Amino acid sequence: EPEVTQTPSHQVTQMGQEVILRCVPISNHLYFYWYRQILGQKVEFLVSFYNNEISEKSEIFDDQFSVERPDGSNFTLKIRSTKLEDSAMYFCASKRYSNQPQHFGDGTRLSIL
Amino acid sequence: GIQVEQSPPDLILQEGANSTLRCNFSDSVNNLQWFHQNPWGQLINLFYIPSGTKQNGRLSATTVATERYSLLYISSSQTTDSGVYFCAVGYAGGTSYGKLTFGQGTILTVHP
């Protein structure tokens, strides 16, 4: 069964540095999402992406965040100047049609020092 | 935005016992998914169930969309069922692109 693939599985970065989290959604999917989960808390929506543009974003998704789908297969989340509170598990998800379930990757655990 | 409440927050069982987890939501949805988060943090999709009833082995789920709740049943629990169970809901249509809103989760511990 096709899977959503995320890399790296764990990223450790110094505060203030830029990080790029990478995702390869399922190949024929059209809707893409990023979520984050701070340790011990619930999963929170960050941003959705459809038709090569951001379709919806949460209050968390401020100017330090950006997303790209640079080549039709990868879907990236960039955090420009990381803060301690950005430490979390970041999940990528995708789906083919609006009335179908979202498929989640295994997540990238981001640790900011 | 939509509110999602899960109950109970914690559940401790002996192996072999049955359990019911509940998810209440505050608005109309056309997407509801149940996930199991394992100790490695992976979100395992259990059910996509915006309405009706589904069964998969020892697990089954029912969503009554008109009354805004869903139930997850675990029968004959095993130690490997331990973890956090999340309900997530969303609406796709119009200007909404189906983002999921997660509940706080139910932490299930199954003792041998």
Image (cartoon, helix red, strand yellow):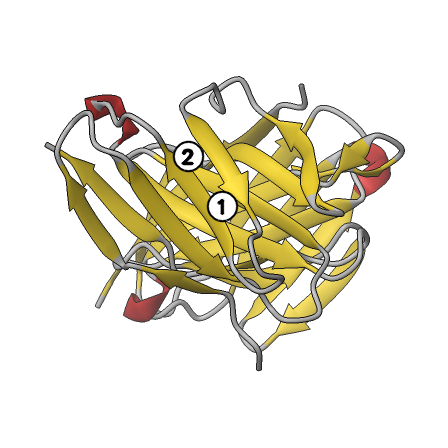
Which residue in the rendered view is the most extreme toward the right?
Answer: B94
Rendering coords of residue B28 (x, y %):
81, 31
* A72 or B48: nearer the viewer: A72
Amino acid at pointer 2: Lys
Mark identifier at residue A42:
2
Check chain identity for marks 1 and 2: say if they share one.
no
Q: Quadrant of residue A18?
A: top left
Subunit under mark 1? B
Secondary-structure class at tag 2: loop
> Which residue type carries mark 1?
Phe
Q: Is residue B103 left or right of residue B43?
A: right
Q: Position of residue A38 (x, y in %)?
A: 31, 33
Q: Quadrant of the N terminus of chain B?
A: top right
Distance (Cα) linking label 1 and label 2: 8 Å
B48 in relation to A16, above or below: below
Residue at figure coordinates x 41%, y 34% from the top left: A42
- Horizontal relation, residue A11 to residue B6: left or right: left
In front here: B33 or B21?
B33
Nearer to me, A46 or B73: A46
Does the residue at mark 1 contact the one at mark 2 (Cβ under 8 Å)? yes
Q: Nearer the viewer, residue A51 or B22?
A: A51
Q: Is residue A50 something that shows in the picture?
A: yes
Residue under the image location 63 percent in, 39 percent down: A48
Can residue B102 be seen at all in this image of the molecule?
Answer: no
Label 2 resides on the chain identified as: A
Label at residue B86: 1
